[in-house]
Each structure stands twice: as C-alpha cells, then as structure tokens.
Image (spheres, rainbow, N blue to C red):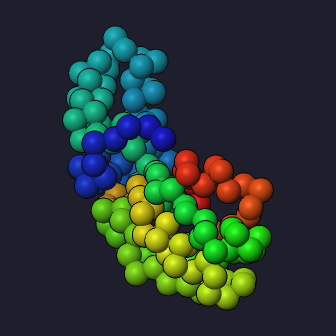
Amino acid sequence: MPYFLHPASCQSARRLNARLVGVYPGLTLSRVLRATRRNLPGRIGAGVFLLGLALFSGCAATPQDRGPEFVRGEGLVYPEDAKARGIEGYVVVEYGISESGEVVSPRVVASDPAGIFDAAALQAVAGWHYRPQVKDGAFVETPRVRSRVNFKLSGAAPYANFQKP
C-alpha cells in the first residue's frame, strides 16, 4: 500500500475531486493531472496548482476505504499439558479492532477440544496489532473480527515467531 500522511488530511482533495465530478461528470483530479502532463505548455500553472494541492494534502495515492490489516502478533504459546498429552485443536476468537489498531474484547466463539487451548489463544490474540480500518478517509473501529487459531504439534516450533492470524 502506498505511504500516506493521514486519511483526515485528504478532505480538501476529496472535496475538489467531488466538485470536479459534479460539474464535469467523469472528470477527476487524477484525470486533470494526466491531461496537464500531456499539455504542459498551455496549462502548467493549473497543473502545478492541482498537483501541489494533492501532494500537500497527502492524497496523491491515498486509498479512502480499506479494511484492517494485520501488522504483527506476539508468539503463540502451545500449552505444556496439551503438548505432553499429544492434543491438537483450534480456537475461534471474536474481537474488535480499535481506531488505534489494538485488539479489544477478545472472546472465544468455538474451540475443539473445548477449554484446552482457550487461554493460550486469547493471550495470543490480545497481543496482535493492526493498521486500523479506514472508511471515508478516517480511522474507524472494526467491531467484529473472527480468527481461527490452530494448535498443531507438527507446527509447534514456528509458533514462537508467529506473524499472521
């Protein structure tokens, strides 16, 4: 994803884009900039102004809407008693993602076998971090996300370097 300053800083460029589309259907800020590059001698002043506005507001390549994106997670710890008894399973955890990207209110929705891996899964999910969801150019909370956390003995070693849900 392209780097951007902050979704809220895009408001002026979005307004300009909406005005262009309202007055001239199908015309957008990016089309104006492309046309300006093709016709530099006659329109360099307008092109430089629009390009400056887009870059100053941080909106040249900023997506307005996107879902939350997983960034990193703490290591998942396989419970010692389950490991010693050779038990494998999974836990489905439901949680929210705050405007700052933190996991909030994780809870177990389903698990097999029940109760064996619940605490380890909740502890792991609580340590996950996300880039928050962006809607209409602003960070928003994501209320209900579900992730399945698998516990397999054959893959127990990689849990120490766990990176994605």
Q: Residue 63 in the image: state x and y as whole percent.
A: 44, 49
Q: Residue 107 in the image: state x and y as whole percent.
A: 50, 84
Q: Residue 131 in the image: state x and y as whole percent.
A: 41, 55
Query: For the point 72% across and 84% down, which residue is it?
Result: 113
Foreground residue among 96 and 88? 88
Picture layout, residue 34 above or below residue 68? above
| Residue 58 visible somewhere in the drawing | yes
**Quarter of the picture holding the C terminus:** bottom right
| Residue 69 visible somewhere in the drawing | no
Query: For the point 46% across and 52% down, which residue is it?
Result: 72
Query: For the point 34% across and 58% down, which residue is it?
Result: 137
6 vs 107, left or right, is left
Foreground residue among 81 and 65? 81
98 vs 121, left or right, is left
Foreground residue among 47 and 4? 4
Picture layout, residue 63 above or below residue 143? above
